[in-house]
Image (cartoon, rainbow, N blue to C red):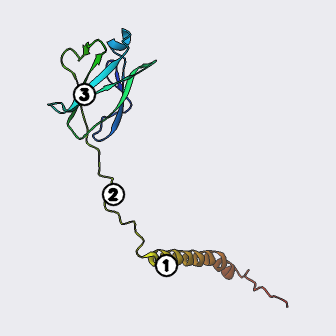
């Protein structure tokens, strides 16, 4: 997903507590810089400030960043000559979304403290299926009179 010119992410949304791959094809890639670093932090005060060297590929400079629980993800780029691409002194600032936890089930008891309960329910389901099979198979024969008892010769 391209969120701004020359910056791409491997996801549609930037989510808190996730990992994102960033690709940069901006001026440093175009002018042939050898090394590019992403300088990033979180929130209005750039908390957890970090700087990571990006890997040069055929399609741009790339790296992966762990996003933390914050409101925004702020970053800019610099090259080996200490030149900065900081979006005309505005920096690149993107909102981070909270993960939707509505479908997450919490506190599941996965222990089998009562394995007999599972076995009993399984046996009852087998008995019910067998009874339904017999009803479907033999009741129509009884009604139509086509039911003949098998006689075994010893």
| Residue 40: numbered disc | 3
Q: Secondary structure at mark 2?
A: loop
User: Where is residue 138 shown, x and y percent of the image?
Assistant: 66, 79
Mark 3 Cα shell of 10 Å, populated few (<14), some (14-19), many (≥20): many
Q: Is residue 51 above or below residue 81?
A: below
Q: Earlier in the sequence, mark 2 or mark 1?
A: 2
Is any part of residue 5 visible from this angle?
Answer: yes
- Report whether residue 73 is seen: no
| Residue 127 pos. (x, y %) | 56, 78
For image coordinates 33% across by 54% down, the residue present is 104
Residue at position x 26%, y 14% in the image: 82
Q: Is residue 28 above or below residue 38?
A: above
Q: Residues within 10 Å of mark 2 (few under 14, many from 20)?
A: few
Q: Position of residue 18 (x, y in %)?
A: 32, 40
Residue behind mark 1: 120
Determine the CA span between mark 3 and mark 2.
33 Å
Residue 51, by quadrant, is top left
Q: Nearer the viewer, residue 57 or 132?
A: 57
Mark 1, other Cα within 10 Å: few <14 / some 14–19 / many ≥20? few
**Which label is found at residue 105?**
2
Q: Secondary structure at mark 3?
A: strand
């Amino acid at each position: 997903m391209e969120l701004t010119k020359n910056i791409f992410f491997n996801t549609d949304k930037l989510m808190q507590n996730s990992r994102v791959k960033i690709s940069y094809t901006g001026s440093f890639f175009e002018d042939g810089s050898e090394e590019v670093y992403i300088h990033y932090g979180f929130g209005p005060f750039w908390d957890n400030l970090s700087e990571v060297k990006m890997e040069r590929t055929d399609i741009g400079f790339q790296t992966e960043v762990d996003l933390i629980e914050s409101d925004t993800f702020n970053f800019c780029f610099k090259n080996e000559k200490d030149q900065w691409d900081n979006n005309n002194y505005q920096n690149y600032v993107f909102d981070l979304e909270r993960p939707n936890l509505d479908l997450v089930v919490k506190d599941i008891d996965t222990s089998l403290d009562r394995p007999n309960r599972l076995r009993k329910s399984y046996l009852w389901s087998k008995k019910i299926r067998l009874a339904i099979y017999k009803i479907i198979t033999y009741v129509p024969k009884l009604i139509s009179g086509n039911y003949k008892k098998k006689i075994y010769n010893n």
